[in-house]
Image (tube, rainbow, N blue to C red):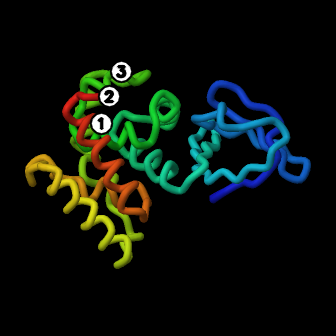
């Protein structure tokens, strides 16, 4: 299994990149080629997909994006190409927000996702994407402070369901940033953004 590849960007297209690693070119499915520039060094965390007629690599700039991709392809009927297309069409945060808020309408706007698959994604992944083993005490205190601040702003406990798990998934450790991210999540949930 190839866990990551570090190399120089040789070429890229709409959903792929070729990394030159010591003279070997790896073509890797990649959701955000606009974040790359030719000849720059990059490290991609990879998922190797092997079938009897195909071997593919999919790469991501962060471990969190890789985990989201792996969770998406665990959904029945959702393959790696469709998951990559989803991650190309929307950001990591938007996809998680849609799943956590059961926004099937948004998920159906993704390429290759119909009503049945959108519902299956929510059914299989709601509450699972935002679990994190990085929940150290300091981060936990800051997240609790952020949730308390949101309560102080007048949000009810029912509106804050799943907020703590969502904030953990963001990997932020500044209370102000966490509150801002929480407010954006709540606005999206209410359809304000």
Q: Is residue 40 left or right of residue 157?
A: right
> Picture coordinates of residue 95 (x, y %)?
37, 38
Q: Which mark is residue 130?
A: none
Pointers 3 and 2 in contact (C-beta within 8 Å): yes
- In percent of width and height, residue 86 lies at 45, 31
Alpha carbon of mark 3 to alpha carbon of mark 1: how far? 11 Å
For mark 2, what is the residue? 107
Q: CA distance from mark 1 to mark 2?
A: 7 Å
Task: Give 4 or 89, whichever is nearer the viewer.
Answer: 89
Query: Residue at horizontal 35%, vertical 21%?
Result: 109
Label number found at residue 98: 1
Chain-order first, disc 3 or disc 1: 1
User: Which element type, helix, strand or loop, lies under badge 2?
Assistant: helix
Q: Residue at x 85, y 40 (%)?
A: 39
Against 4, is 121 above or below?
Answer: above
In which image quadrant can residue 29 be found? top right
Count of labels in the image: 3
Q: Is residue 131 left or right of residue 59?
A: left
Residue 55 falls in image quadrant: top right
Label 3: few (<14), some (14–19) or many (≥20) C-alpha neighbours in 10 Å: some
Question: Can you say whether 179 is above or below 92 in the image?
Answer: below
In the rendered view of the protein, which quadrant contains the C terminus?
Answer: top left
Disc 1 vs disc 2: Cβ atoms closer than 8 Å? yes
Using the numbered discs, state the Cα–Cα distance from disc 3 to disc 2 in whole angstroms.
5 Å
Residue that numbered label 3 is attached to: 109
Farthest-out residue, bottom:
137
């Amino acid at each position: 299994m190839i866990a990551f590849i570090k190399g120089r960007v040789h070429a890229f297209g709409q959903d792929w990149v070729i990394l030159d690693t010591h003279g070997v070119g790896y073509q890797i499915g990649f959701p955000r080629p606009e974040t790359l520039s030719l000849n720059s060094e990059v490290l991609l965390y990879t998922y190797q997909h092997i079938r009897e007629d195909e071997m593919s690599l999919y790469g991501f700039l962060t471990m969190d994006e890789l985990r989201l991709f792996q969770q998406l392809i665990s959904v029945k009927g959702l393959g790696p190409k469709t998951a990559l297309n989803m991650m190309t069409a929307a950001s990591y945060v938007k996809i998680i927000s849609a799943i956590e808020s059961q926004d099937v309408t948004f998920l159906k706007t993704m390429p290759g996702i119909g009503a049945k698959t959108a519902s299956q994604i929510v059914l299989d992944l709601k509450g699972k994407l935002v679990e994190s083993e990085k929940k150290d005490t300091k981060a936990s205190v800051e997240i609790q402070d952020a949730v308390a601040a949101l309560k102080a702003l007048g949000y009810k406990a029912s509106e804050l369901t799943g907020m703590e798990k969502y904030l953990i998934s963001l990997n932020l450790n500044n209370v102000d940033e966490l509150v801002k991210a929480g407010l954006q999540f709540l606005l999206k949930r209410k359809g304000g953004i």
